Amino acid sequence: MSFKIAVAGKGGTGKTTLAALIVRHLLESGNKPVLAVDADADANFADLLGIKDVKTIGTIREEVQGTKGKVPLSMDKNTFVEMRLEDVLIEQEGFDLAVMGRSEGSGCYCYVNNLLRKYLDRLEGNYPYIVIDNQAGLEHLSRHTTDNVDVLLLVSDASVKGITTAIKVKELAEELKLKVSKMYLVISRLPSGDVPKALEKKANESGLEIFATIPYDEQVLDYDLNEKSILGLDSSAKAACAVSELMGKIENRTLKNDKGNSKH
Ligand SMILES: Nc1ncnc2c1ncn2[C@@H]1O[C@H](COP(=O)(O)OP(=O)(O)OP(=O)(O)O)[C@@H](O)[C@H]1O
Ligand SMILES: [Mg+2]
């Protein structure tokens, strides 16, 4: 069984950076292979993982629909999708990356989406850990691309707006009855010092506890400015240490809750 972790929250709060830091942590701790999934149409998970040449699953959808390229006459669609998924999966040392790409345009994509889902489900079984980066906001929730996850990290910066979006994500996920076992609030890019009391109060009022914080880290900024892969970040970097702690906490809670607690 794979353990699926996804991130969600307001734009620019540090979701992709956190997802990349989680992949980095899993590789360092030997939890391989990891499947990294970029579910953001504005994909930049690949950049942070040091991958330049990106192929997307969205292209397969277009090929099956016949809007771009097409399925060879000699091949049935099942075989085609299976073959193309292998092509677009980006294989790296210790992890693979699947980039979803743009979501469907006009026309009915149910058939091809179902096909893709079937093969993605099968593919996911090959990995002990799956890390999903999402686009900002709430839309991905209603499209059910964030379903069947073990831990959904609600990422906020140290602002009321960030927490408010995190709360909305939580409420919508509950309303849509998404299969999410746990939702944890993470304050990212936290300036030095404690979490402001006002943010703690706001989170607690909605039934969320601040599960972890990721400090503002100049090294992360330096990596961003120099377009370097987060995977190369030193394990002593503040943000890397915080993510190791966060993952340790998730592991502890999962072990504690494991018995008898299934996804609802
Ligand atoms: N812990 C951190 N310390 C310093 N800078 C950070 C940290 N986390 C993220 N950043 C910086 O903040 C900016 C936004 O981060 P990121 O792209 O991860 O956010 P996002 O939530 O994925 O954004 P979007 O909603 O656009 O997808 C980037 O420049 C990133 O380098
Ligand atoms: Mg992002």
Image: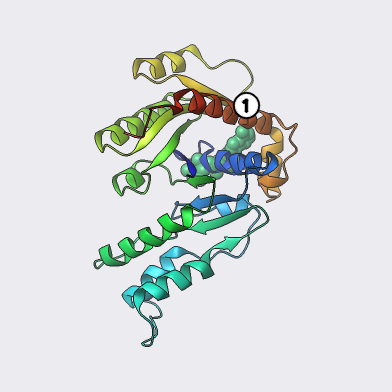
Tell me the kind of residue under disc 1. Answer: Glu
- Residue at image position (36%, 72%) is 78
On screen, 11 above or below 258?
below
Give the left or right position of residue 90, taking residue 179 as reference: right
Residue 238: x, y in percent? 69, 29
Please, which colouring scheme is shown?
A: rainbow
Q: Is residue 188 visible?
A: no
Residue 94: x, y in percent? 65, 52
Give the residue at mark 1.
245
Give the left or right position of residue 86, taking residue 180 as reference: right
Mark 1 crowd level (few <14, some 14–19, many ≥20, 10 Å Cα): some
Q: Is residue 246 visible?
A: yes
- Residue at image position (41%, 75%) is 80
Residue 262: x, y in percent? 37, 32
Q: Between residue 228 and residue 153, name the one nearer to us.
A: 153
Occupied quadrant, residue 202? top left
